[in-house]
Image (cartoon, grey):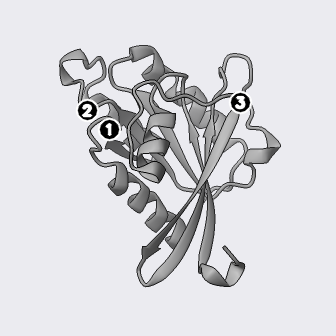
């Protein structure tokens, strides 16, 4: 795709604990399929996806960052600068939710103050296994001054919506 073929190009990254569904969300959005055991081979991977919105063509370069935050508390230079961030946790895994503040601090240390961040509670199809309530996650997002959206890569719930929302935030920032 040539520069003249799009109006905007945005770099988006997924951050969050291993196993929370970052790769599944990315594959569902870009490839329109669901893999039960999707994963990133290595520290990071990326895909391109082009969308039309508000009469504009937007090219998204979407990075899936896969590293244990305990051993690496800064984002690699390949992921800078970035235009938007999905901070993902698994609603059935309390530990992944407890890591959100750390991931948020990692992100904030390497972005501009107007870079939009969306907190994504993934695996909402597993309601009977939920360990983090919607209200608890929403309260955390409100405290961080970011938006909270729940998704299910498996059922394709809110996948397009979460990308559309972040894309609108990036256009307007």
Residue 173: in sight, yes or no? no
How busy is the neighbourhood of tag 2: few (under 14 within 10 Å), some, or many (20 plus)?
A: some
Q: Is residue 86 above or below residue 6?
A: above
For the residues labelled 3 and 2, say whether their Cβ atoms are less than 8 Å apart.
no
Instruction: State the residue position of label 2.
Output: 134
Q: Disc 3 versus disc 2: distance between alpha carbons?
A: 30 Å
Q: Quadrant of residue 125?
A: top left
Question: Residue 5: horizontal and vertical position, in percent?
Answer: 62, 81
Question: Residue 89: horizontal and vertical position, in percent?
Answer: 44, 29
The quadrant in which the N terminus is found is bottom right
What secondary structure is marked by label 3? Answer: loop
What secondary structure is marked by label 1? Answer: helix
x 32%, y 40%: residue: 151
Describe residue 40's horizontal placement relative to residue 158 as left or right.
right
What secondary structure is marked by label 2? Answer: helix
x 27%, y 44%: residue: 157
Out of 165 and 44, give the one closest to the viewer.
44
Question: Residue 59: horizontal and vertical position, in percent?
Answer: 58, 67
Describe residue 155's horizontal placement relative to residue 30 as left or right.
left
Q: Counting residues from the N terminus, which is met first, the one under dot 3 or under dot 1?
A: 3
Dot label at residue 138: 1
Instruction: State the residue position of label 3.
Output: 43
For the residues labelled 2 and 1, say whether their Cβ atoms are less than 8 Å apart.
yes
Residue 128: in sight, yes or no? yes
Report the mark closest to the observer, 3 or 2.
3
x 66%, y 40%: residue: 45
How busy is the neighbourhood of tag 1: few (under 14 within 10 Å), some, or many (20 plus)?
A: some
Question: Residue 28: horizontal and vertical position, in percent?
Answer: 41, 44
Q: Counting residues from the N terminus, which is met first, the one under dot 3 or under dot 2?
A: 3
Q: Quadrant of residue 138?
A: top left
Out of 95 and 46, give the one closest to the viewer.
46
């Amino acid at each position: 795709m040539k520069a003249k073929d799009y109006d905007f190009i945005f770099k988006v990254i997924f951050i969050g604990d291993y196993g929370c569904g970052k790769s599944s969300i990315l594959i569902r959005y870009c490839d329109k399929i669901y893999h039960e055991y999707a994963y990133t081979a290595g520290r990071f991977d990326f895909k391109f996806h082009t969308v039309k919105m508000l009469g504009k063509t937007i090219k998204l370069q979407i990075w899936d960052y896969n590293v244990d935050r305990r051993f690496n508390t800064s984002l690699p230079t390949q992921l800078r600068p970035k235009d938007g961030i999905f901070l993902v946790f698994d609603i059935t895994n309390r530990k992944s939710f407890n890591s959100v503040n750390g991931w948020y601090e990692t992100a904030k240390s390497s972005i501009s103050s107007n870079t939009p961040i969306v907190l994504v509670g993934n695996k909402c199809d597993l309601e009977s296994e939920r360990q983090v309530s919607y209200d608890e996650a929403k309260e955390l997002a409100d405290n961080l001054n970011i938006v909270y959206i729940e998704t299910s890569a498996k059922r394709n719930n809110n996948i397009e919506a979460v990308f559309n929302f972040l894309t609108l935030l990036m256009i307007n920032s």
